[in-house]
């Protein structure tokens, strides 16, 4: 027996590539192509380094209150964490402690099963339909919890508020966690359902729609009881999760609603235009409600196309995974970036036709 026998063995999540090359069109990790609000910039410029000698607010009290006001909730219904990934991980640890399986779609974030492995949570993958749609009835069964990304990643497809309510009504003995990381790009948030269901937990992020991937700021909303338990778990290993500057930046972002709506609207417009151009080129495109599109071409191998795009200094996302290995996920960038992608694809497909 050696110390190696007592190590925790896990298969870690592998995030999208962060290339150091500056001349690439980076469309692989769903970052916002536009900068944060100027109010965020002002907070950074005005921040006094002397403040760093002091501990930050243990529960980000001011930011929690700002988020509660923004979403018409009570402060004790808001949890703040270091990015939505951490908030999700803590939620798994807090809410899913049954011997019954946690239910999740078979096509979704790959780190959901990883969290289950890390925390020894039994789980069951529920297959999406061939068109990647989600069947609500599939979740009307015994379970120890449910986690659904809405809109889905990587398909980009969303389910309705009514469908989420059906799931909640039929699963009132377990937590239903809805991951709304991309909700601002066209989906319908289920936050209003918190008034009716105390077993609902909703996770959101400042990363995508608010252009703040660099500070790691995630949020959970739920009943006061659920959020209190989430804080108990978090405080069991780290009482100071959010740094002082990140808290100020989050507050500033919430205060500039005009810029937020303008930025989101630009991305949605670019996405819809990009989808139309892809369809003209023969691509199959899902009905994305996110800041990315999920695409497949019947005449082109996805792995080959991924490599060709990379060689052209356009980086997108591809998974060698059952059911989606012939699909690519492409983040929505600026109009100029997306036009560059379209021009490349036109030439690529034209040359492909000549070789037939």
Image (cartoon, grey):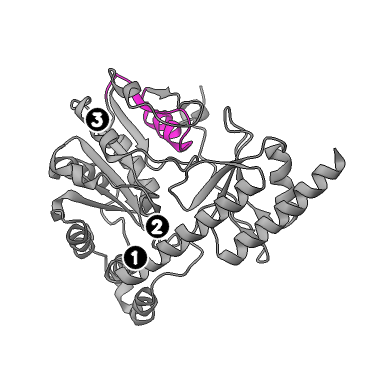
Residue drawn at (36%, 80%), measured in percent from left and top? Answer: 42
Labelled pair 2, 1 in contact (Cβ < 8 Å):
yes
Side of 64 where 85 appears, left or right? right
Q: For residue 114: magenta? A: yes
Q: Which residues are magenta?
A: 98-122
Q: Seen from this angle, which residue lies furthest front?
A: 280
Q: Which mark is residue 166?
A: 3
Which residue, given by chain and number where applicable, does mark 1 sit on? 246
Q: Total marks drawn?
A: 3
What is the C-alpha distance between the residues marked 1 and 3?
37 Å
* x then y, percent, for residue 46: 34, 82
Residue 255, position in %: x, y?
27, 70
Residue, x 54% and y 57% (percent of image)?
A: 273
Earlier sequence position, callout 2 versus callout 1:
2
Would you say residue 165 sits in the magenta stretch? Answer: no
Give whichever of discs 1 and 3 has the lower sequence position: 3
Q: CA distance from mark 3 to mark 2?
A: 32 Å
Asked whether residue 211 is in view, the answer is no
Dot 1, how many residues are within 10 Å of its Cα: few (below 14), some (14-19), or many (20+)? many
User: On residue 327, which mark appears?
Assistant: none
Residue 237, image x and y in percent? Answer: 29, 46
Rendered location of residue 87, percent (x, y) = 33, 46
């Amino acid at each position: 027996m050696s110390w190696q026998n007592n190590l925790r063995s896990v298969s870690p999540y592998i995030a999208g590539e962060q290339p150091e090359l500056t001349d690439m069109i980076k469309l692989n990790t769903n970052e916002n192509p536009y900068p944060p609000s100027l109010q965020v910039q002002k907070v950074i410029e005005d921040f006094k380094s002397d403040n760093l000698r002091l501990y930050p607010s243990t529960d980000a009290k001011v930011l929690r209150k700002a988020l509660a006001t923004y979403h018409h909730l009570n402060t004790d219904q808001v949890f703040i964490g270091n990015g939505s990934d951490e908030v999700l991980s803590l939620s798994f640890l807090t809410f899913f402690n049954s011997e019954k399986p946690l239910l999740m779609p078979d096509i979704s974030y790959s780190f959901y099963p990883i969290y289950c492995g890390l925390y020894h949570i039994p789980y069951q993958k529920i297959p999406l339909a061939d068109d990647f749609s989600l069947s609500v009835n599939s979740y009307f069964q015994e379970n120890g919890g449910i986690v659904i990304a809405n809109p889905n990643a990587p398909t980009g497809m969303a389910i309705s508020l009514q469908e989420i309510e059906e799931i909640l009504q039929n699963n009132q003995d377990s937590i239903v966690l809805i991951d709304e990381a991309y909700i601002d790009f066209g989906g319908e948030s289920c936050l209003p359902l918190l008034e009716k269901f105390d077993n609902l937990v909703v996770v959101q992020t400042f990363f995508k729609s608010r252009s703040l991937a660099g500070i790691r700021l995630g949020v959970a909303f739920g009943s006061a009881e659920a959020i209190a338990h989430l804080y108990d778990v978090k405080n069991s290993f780290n009482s100071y999760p959010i740094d002082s500057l990140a808290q100020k930046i989050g507050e500033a972002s919430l205060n500039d609603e005009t810029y937020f709506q303008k930025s989101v609207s630009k991305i949605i417009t670019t996405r819809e235009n990009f989808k139309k151009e892809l369809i003209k080129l023969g691509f199959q495109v899902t009905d994305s409600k996110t800041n990315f599109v999920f695409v497949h071409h019947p005449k082109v191998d996805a792995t080959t196309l991924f490599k060709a795009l990379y060689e052209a200094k356009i980086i997108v996302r591809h998974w060698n995974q059952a059911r989606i290995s012939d699909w690519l996920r492409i983040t929505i960038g600026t109009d100029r970036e997306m036009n560059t992608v379209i021009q490349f694809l036109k030439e690529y497909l034209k040359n492909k036709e000549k070789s037939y």
